[in-house]
Amino acid sequence: MQILLIEDEGDLATYIARCLTENGHIVDHSPRGDSGFQLANNGNYDLLIVDRMLPGMDGLALVKALRVLKSEIPVLFLSNLAGIDERVEGLNSGGDDYLAKPFAAQELLARVNALLRRPHRVGQPTTIHVGDLEIDLIQRQAKRAGREIDLFPREFSLLEYLMRRPDQVVTRTMILEGVWDYHFDPKTNIVETHISRLRSKIGGDLIQTVRGSGYLIRAARAVT
Amino acid sequence: MRRGQLLKSASFRLAAAYVGLFCISVGILAGLIYVYATSELRHEIRTRIVADSSALREEYSRGGLKQLEDAVADRQRGRLVGGLDYAIFDSKGKHLFGDLPAAPCVHGWTTFTGPPDGDEPSGEMESLGVLITPLPHGNCLFVGDDIGKVRTFGSLILGSFGWVFLLTLILAIGGGVFLSSRVLRRIETINRTAEAIIEGDINRRIPRRGAPDDLDRLAATLNRMLDRMTALMESLRHISNDVAHDLRTPLGRLRRTLEQASLTVTSQAEFKQVLQNAVVEVDGILETFGAMLRIAQIESGSRRGGFCRIPLSDLVREVSDTFAPSIEDSGRSMELKIQPECWIQGDKELLIQSLANLLENAITYTPVGAHVVVSLMRNKSEIELCVADNGPGVPATMRQNIFKRFYKVDPSRTAAGNGLGLSIVAAVAELHAARVFANDNKPGLKIALVFSAAA
């Protein structure tokens, strides 16, 4: 996939670019906001990674300008400003995700992959299948091989979050943000304990732990 | 220089303005009294002259010239000081009686001036006001009185006012100088103290006189302000000390590990392990910084603008449910006592984080088997959120310190946390104008947040 990285910190840009290239992406880099905007506007990219504070043109302004031009390209904001207001501002200006520096490489990769797979304007499905596991988003019910599974609301949300991203690694932070809307890092293993309870209810084989990264529900494996 | 300072001082100017105002009012008073008194006196003299003239005219019409002369002679014989002067002229203007000079016999007032007789102000002539009354058969009656005494009386009034005026002026100026120099001295003391503090003697305070006047109150207020500032500076110094200390420890540990590794590690696997440990250590440091930035952001109060009505009962239940599996898996138990429909004005995210911090503390600082009670109670206009455990608790002497940044009840347990969890809770409480308490749960620790309920 073609990714445009607009980041003025040289070291960080090199680190991100290498990390993405190693995972099979093609990365263009621009160290300035204004030239980055030109590239983004003219080029054909699948994803933008934009720093919030850039020389030439502010990251927020850049994304706003792109959205005005009807660009629907997914945008991941990077920022030193880990504050809550800044995150909300970033998402309001048209960003699709927000990652505070410093971050782990896995976290970045997981979020990039999630954004690249984000379906563009697909009608909302009412049921999701992964293998023989099926969830009904309206009834809020889960069934495995036709047998109903009794889930707490939060467990259902967690399962839904994972099933909407089959074969994708989702990190602990992504789950905290996506399922609980928690934007801080609890030291308690709440994600782990919820995953383990969910596993014990739906069967241990579906949700895999990816060491050092997060979790993944594998659609292909369940089929076989 | 000192005199210039005195003349420019606010208190001296105030005194001078008072003196000026007083002088003007005394002047107006003197003028009014002068005008009123002299015109009254003049009126009285004329009334007496008019009355006597008509009495004498009566005598004349009853007994002719002879009786008139007798009556006048009678009056002159019994004349006392301040009595009237008389004269009678016949139709040819011949002087028949009395010692007033001649004048045309026309009814009305006239004024004679003559040589001074001793009661006039020096250098002035005797001045007589005379009423001329024509009588039948061409005779003419003059009745007069010394009107110079009106002016004498007036000067007396003005003179005494002048003395009062002078005395007042002297007293006022003297008093003004005295008072303002006293005030100036005290202001100078305050000034010198301030200069000393600017120079670096931060513990200097303005000396008090113990008198309950406004300058002493000002000194007390300034001293209190200085105390507060010193305390704030002290706590700031503490915080930066603590930051330095708290970051030195893990950085030192990191350095030791890396140094050790560079000397002893030989295999790739070992090396990887060392690096992974280093990353964990650095993450801890970054987390400490993140927490400090978060506290700073909360304390700035900027989040207050985004406050909205929060269903605290639902929030507490959801967060507790989220943590319940972790608490149970850790071998502890949790009990919820949540009164429904408790609403407050607040910031959802920060409230969640505070409760999460409290629950995490209850897990971290209690032994396995501990029981945690989360309660939410509404009491009239107040809502109390409590997280209580039956663990070892915190000694009473340390309890008030646990909300301070980097404070650790047991400093040897470095791994247990960064000492900022409860500081965040305290900052969030302050943002919500809530009171926060740490109490003895007998046994255990009970942290309570008291919010005011939303309408």
Image: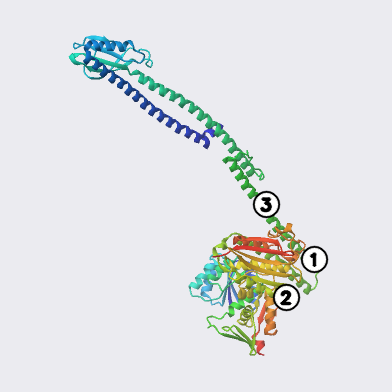
Residue drawn at x 24%, y 11% as measured from the top left: B67
* Colour pattern of the rendering: rainbow
Q: Position of residue A99 (x, y in %)?
A: 61, 70
Q: Which residue is mark 2?
A: B329
Q: Is residue B201 above or below residue A106?
A: above
Q: Tell me the quadrant of the picture where the C terminus of chain B can be found.
A: bottom right
Residue drawn at x 24%, y 15% as measured from the top left: B59
Residue B399 seen in the figure: yes
Q: Position of residue A14 (x, y in %)?
A: 64, 70
Q: Quadrant of residue A79?
A: bottom right
Badge 1 crowding class, 10 Å Cα cut-off, few under 14, some 14 to 19, many 20 or more, is: few
Badge 2 crowding class, 10 Å Cα cut-off, few under 14, some 14 to 19, many 20 or more, is: few
Chain for disc number 3:
B
- Rounded to the nearest angstrom, the CA distance separating label 1 from label 3 is 38 Å
Residue A20 seen in the figure: no
Badge 3 crowding class, 10 Å Cα cut-off, few under 14, some 14 to 19, many 20 or more, is: few
Q: Are marks 1 and 3 on the same chain?
A: yes
Local SS, label 3? helix
- Rounded to the nearest angstrom, the CA distance separating label 3 from label 2 is 43 Å
Q: Tell me the quadrant of the picture where the N terminus of chain B can be found.
A: top right
Residue drawn at x 66%, y 43% as measured from the top left: B204
Q: Which residue is mark 1?
A: B260
Which one is in front in this view, the residue at disc 1 or the one at disc 3? 3
> Most extreme residue toward the left, as rendered?
B137
Local SS, label 2? helix
Chain for disc number 2:
B
